[in-house]
Amino acid sequence: MRRAWRVIELLGLPTIGLGAALALAPDRVDLEVHVWLLVVLGLALLSLMGLVRSAYPSTPSPFAASLRQSRGIVARPGALVRLQREVSMAGSAAFDVHYRLRPALIELAAG
């Protein structure tokens, strides 16, 4: 019974608007009915979305929860810091690529 009143309330205002529009401009009946239909269907869609939202309450996904977990600051190993520095220097000069980065990459590839 409560839902029936809710439907009547939702349809009441657009129907009153349709009646007023028909009284003010009786020559544009097609347009007025189409606008009324769009409003009613929009309200029905909003009601359906509310039903779905109440049936399936939103819970945070495990992925989002794992992103929110605070992790302590982890210190980088010295070798990683050294390799990162060599890569950044290799971007500026060919000398650094050949004599600094190349031996480190050969060592990594051998491992």
Image (tube, rainbow, N blue to C red):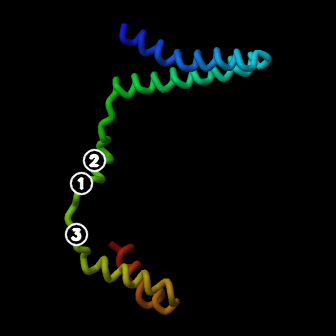
Q: Which residue is mark 3?
A: 74
Q: Residues within 10 Å of mark 3 (few under 14, many from 20)?
A: few
Furthest residue toward top: 1
Q: Are marks 2 and 1 in contact (CB under 8 Å)?
A: yes
Proximity of marks 1 and 3: CB atoms separated by less than 8 Å? no
Tell me what residue is drawn at x 33 percent, y 34 percent: 58
Q: Position of residue 84 (x, y in %)?
A: 37, 79
Residue in view at x 24 percent, y 54 percent:
69
Task: Identify residue for label 2.
Answer: 65
Nearer to me, 79 or 65: 65
The image shows residue 75, relative to residue 11, as above or below, that is below
* Whole-percent x, y for residue 36 in the image: 63, 20
Residue 6 drawn above or below residue 110:
above
Q: Quadrant of residue 3?
A: top left
Could you tell me the amino acid type at mark 1?
Gln
The residue that disc 1 covers is 69
Closer mark to the observer between disc 1 and disc 3: 1
Residue at 41% x, 26% y is 50
Three-letter amino acid code at the position of disc 2: Ala
Q: CA distance from mark 2 to mark 3?
A: 20 Å
* Distance Cα–Cα, label 1 vs label 3: 14 Å
Residue at the image point whose x is 32% and y is 47% from the top: 64
Residue type of the residue flagged with mark 3? Val
Give the mark, 1 or 3, whose residue is nearer the N terminus: 1
Work out whether residue 59 or residue 26 is closer to the camera in this orientation and state it.
26
- Residue 87, how many percent across, how many down? 42, 81
